[in-house]
Image (cartoon, rainbow, N blue to C red):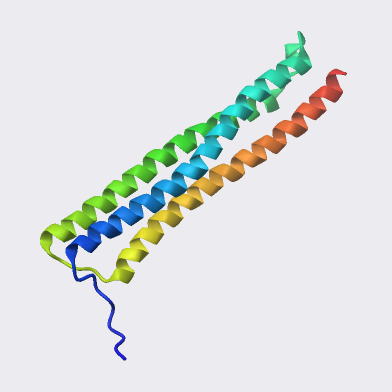
Amino acid sequence: MSRKKKTIEIPGKQVEGWENAEKAIGENADLLSERTYSLAAGGLALSFTVMSFIVGEEKSALGWQALAIWGLFLLCIILDTISIFSAKRKAEKLELFFREKENQGQTMPETEVNKMIDHTNRSINRFNMIVFILLLITIVWTFIYSYLLLIKVS
């Protein structure tokens, strides 16, 4: 049994590999991105409303923590937007790379193609997961701060 690396015989397969990569990257980035954006935008709006309702006319009751919470919600929205553009850019780079290989008539080991796709997908997923964890921490902090603010004002 030969241990030779399997190569992609047909250059069109490389384009198919890119299309699979773009699809996987796009789906993962879009799914988590939608959730992150929705939670961050909703959390920002809801925290404004709830905290304003809690403090009423006494706006001085809002401390630096309220500003930090709102800043973190905004940061999550910005990082989410960066993630979307980054995923698209990485997919475009992979497309260009695979198309150049196809135009040159070169073949690549299938394992190498898969490694490139997996590496790109993992890096995007890590970034999105960090943003999502930051968002969850901000949401928990918002609940705790709102509760403490409610106690303080009452």
Taking 131 as reference, is 69 above or below it?
above
Place of residue 26 in the rendered image (x, y in percent of width and height, measured from the top left): 40, 46
Q: Residue furthest right?
A: 154
Q: Is residue 87 left or right of residue 139?
A: left
In the picture, the quarter occupied by the C terminus is top right
Q: Is residue 136 left or right of residue 114?
A: right
In the picture, the quarter occupied by the N terminus is bottom left
Q: Is residue 4 left or right of residue 25?
A: left
x 33%, y 48%: residue: 90
Taking 129 as reference, is 152 above or below it?
above
x 27%, y 83%: residue: 4
Place of residue 72 in the rendered image (x, y in percent of width and height, measured from the top left): 59, 32
Q: Residue furthest bottom?
A: 1
Place of residue 25 in the rendered image (x, y in percent of width and height, measured from the top left): 40, 50
Q: Is residue 64 left or right of residue 7?
A: right
Count of numbered circles on the image: 0
Q: Residue furthest top?
A: 57
Camera-nearest residue between 151 and 112: 112
x 15%, y 66%: residue: 106
x 24%, y 61%: residue: 14
Place of residue 136 in the rendered image (x, y in percent of width and height, measured from the top left): 64, 41
